Amino acid sequence: MKRMKKNRRKRNEVLTAYGFLLPNLVGLTVFVFFPMIYAFYVSLHDWNALSPKVFIGFDNYVEMASDKRWWASVGRTFLFTLIYVPALYCLSLFFAVILNNLKQKYQSIARTMFLLPFAITSVISAVIWMFLYDPRNGVLNQLLSSLGFDKLEFLGSTNQALVSIVVVILWINIGYNMIIFMASIKEIPKDYYEAAKIDGASAWRAFRSITFPLLRGTSTFILIVTMIASFTVFDQIMVMTSGGPASSTEVSVLYIYKQAFEFLNMGYASALAVILFLIIFILSLAQLRLYTKKG
Amino acid sequence: MKLWKKLMTIGFVLTLIVMAGCSSDSEGESGDVVTLTFSDFHSEGDQEFFEGLVDEYNKMQDEVKIEYTTTGNLTDYSNTKLPVAFANNEGPDIFMTSPGDFQKYADAGVLADLSPYFKEGVKEDFLPSALEAVTVDDKILALPFELELLGLYYNKTMLEEANLEVPKTWDELLAAAKKLTTDDVAGIALPTDKGAYLNFVWYPFLWQNGGSVLNEDGTKSTFNTPEVAEALDIWGSFFQEGAAPSKLQIDPTDIGNLGGGTAAMQIVGTWAIPMLESEYADGDEFGLAPIPIPEGGKHATAAGGWKFAVNAKSEHVKEAADFIMWAVGDDKERPLEYVTETKFAYAPRQSVVEEGKEFYDKGLRKVFTEEIYDSAIPEPKFGAEVVDAVGEALQNVMFGGMSGKEAAKIADEKIQSILDSKK
Amino acid sequence: MKLRKSTITIFAIVCGLLMLAPIYFLVVGAFKTPDSVFDLSLRISDFTFDNIKQVFAETNIVRAIFNSLIVSVTVTVVAMLIHAMAGYALARLNFPGKTFTFGWIISTLMVPFSVIMIPLYMVVQNLGMANSYLGLIVPMIFNAYGIFLFRQFYLEFPKELEEAAYVEGLSIAGTFFRLVLPLSKPIIVPLTIGFFTANWNNYLWPMIINQKEELNVVQVALANIVGGGYETEWSVMLAAALISAIPTFILFFIVQRHLVEGVKTTGIK
């Protein structure tokens, strides 16, 4: 009798799970997966979007191997990710911990302050920052020269442009990620900290042995999502530099976009996209492995 | 429980609204009226002009109905909206094309031959060079309606205060730009971002020095020459020596750089004049001159401008072609209104220029008419990848610290390989 | 200890003010005359409503805001519901093919939008959804991001609550809708902000899929002003930007109170 009930429960569980997943599976298949497969199909063709496709097998992939500009863009994407992901992670976690220690009243004020940049569209945020970054009389340079420093070129310099863009994207996203961290920190039972306090642990110690380990799930999530986002970063770069100056901010998606829509090499662009997808896929998988193994 | 209920209610109400929105959009097409789509990117005054044309046309006859839409944004129009639409066989019947993307549409065969639709004598009325720029294999694949020329605009007061003559040579231009540069004012405002416009502004320098990108029949790159290298170097010096800002706060096509006082000189097109007059009308504050030339060079300026195109895959090529011919290829009033009232440009039709004669002598326009017009060369219609390779060469000398010679050599190889692969 | 707390408070507020500085320039610029917009000093003589008026005069912005609200709210509400369901199934329920399904869903995150834009247009066109609210809404609902975050949340959700519900004889679905979902506020609130903002600010997709002026969303309507027209005043651009951000600001202030509330698990642990 009990066994039968358990079996029924089990069947019920499976059915419920499929039922819960169904809308998303259908939607993702139709609106993401199918277009993705289609992109792969296109990648086997020479297609300029305007005239019929010509099947050329894997020629696009062969061509890619010797496309220096493409591999340079991949390198730049890695560089961008290496700067952006750790910076976003550390800063949003740092401020989550800081804000969490504030009194409720100040906490909500500070939270709103950090979150507001998130409301502004990527295009507009790019516009505002171009104003701040202006090499002649932008706010930042006015500030620098009043402090006695040399003016910087920011977006106009091949060395500074990428970092300048990272700062803008950090500015937009810190608040949001901070809030996700704060939500997880709130889930940590208070008595853990009280116990640590009684043991005489310092704040840093408490963070390292309680907060940080217990945030593993959230950390994994934020790191993976941020990494994917930074591999597919596009809007702000398009508006602020469109890949310049002298290609110093031409990341992979931007190059793919140029191949597809500026040069109308849809087939080739799709092949690049497939490879970019594989790169991201492998990296995410490796990251997931790393975290689950440790845990 | 409560939250769940709330969500359901909101979801339900929204579904109703959405349904209502959907059901109202099926206003059926009536009978035998031909509906044409006209996709544009213009905004503000230009948009009003084209909207006005469409309205007038729709009202004066009842066989064809034209639906006008505009993105209001050029980049999205030519790099996103049109390609996506064409790729899905949903291309508009009527659209706009410029030298920057003409070639890719021509190669793909989506531009309809307009030759059969010209009214008696109109073809001869067009400037030969303007039609030549849109002709492939004796087929006229687009209809030009404006010629925009480039000139050097400058701030008279600033030049006077610095004790400078209006520059006539490259060296004078560079020296003046350096001298005029202060903490608040850029010596000269030039485009900085890679793209067709950057090349467009640079071409006069190239041509004045006797250089070219491709040979006559477009089969070979001619980019690796001392003439090209020198033209690249002079551009590089503006940026490397800090006389031209590496980033502009205002779009380089916008005369606001000069008008607002953040630049002492700016190379920009005919379109800037109405703006300068209406927004920055401080009397004789601003002057205009031909673009300076190298020692021993000869004057040249680039003539750009948009063209009407008809989708060759449209079911109604004739009706679409009839409309654009009516709009700018028939009487003189409509095209003249556009190039004189809506904006300032030259009409590519001799009779229209003739009609607007007195207008072309007003204010700064006179400089264009008398000193610049004759040296105009239509912007070449290169494929997008060649445009990009030229742009890369410019970026390399402007920001990459390369010499003109190195940049020209790299671009030359790139261009040649592009040409070879297209065969 | 007291002193330290106030130091931290001051530090946090100062950092918060730094975060706000760019927005300050946005707001101030929106009310300045075109000539003074680059001038950092504030003078009452530079103050003007003209920019705001111009935005309202040149675009049908009221209708566009209405359209954007319909799209963003619908996407957000539907997405929250179905993503929570999927996230819950992936975190809590056992069924064959779970790991694969999860991996598959996550892999859809890795596709840059600009790459699938053309096929997506094709799909939506063939479903007859182009030029309608449906075309603007439906493709934007499906996004692995929400599923991922819900799953992460439910993994750490206290099991005891559900077990108690099962004992009471509630079905799995019943437990989820009556008990779990209402307690998911800590994750629903930030995700609502995320989805609403992303859709409110979406530009590329509405631009290509819709040709009808009456269905223009805010960002598309504003592109007529902000986009590369021949005359673009900075002050007008900033005013347009400010108007477009206001609904999101309002949303932030409304949900602000509910942000960062822990699951009330008192008495269970």
Image (cartoon, rainbow, N blue to C red):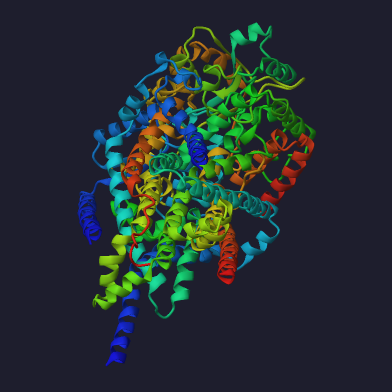
Asked if residue A114 shows in the view, the reply is yes
Q: Which residue is drawn at the image coordinates 53% and 7% (left, top)?
A: B284
Task: In the rendered view, tell whether residue B100 sits above or below residue B125.
Answer: below
Question: Residue B399 appears at what percent x and percent y?
Answer: 70, 35
Question: Residue A52 appears at what percent x and percent y?
Answer: 50, 60
Where residue B216 sits, quadrant-wise, is top right
Question: Residue B85 appears at what percent x and percent y?
Answer: 42, 51
Asked if residue B87 shows in the view, the reply is no
Residue at the bottom extreme?
A: A1
Q: Which residue is drawn at the image coordinates 33% and 79% (left, top)?
A: A13
Where residue B178 sits, quadrant-wise, is top right
Task: In the rendered view, tell whether residue A226 sits above or below residue C38.
Answer: below
**In this rendering, position of residue A183 left or right of residue B177:** left
Q: Which of A184 and B35 is in front in this view?
A: A184
Q: Which of A276 and B8 is in front in this view?
A: B8
Q: Which of B356 and C167 is in front in this view?
A: C167
Question: Residue A194 appears at what percent x and percent y?
Answer: 47, 57
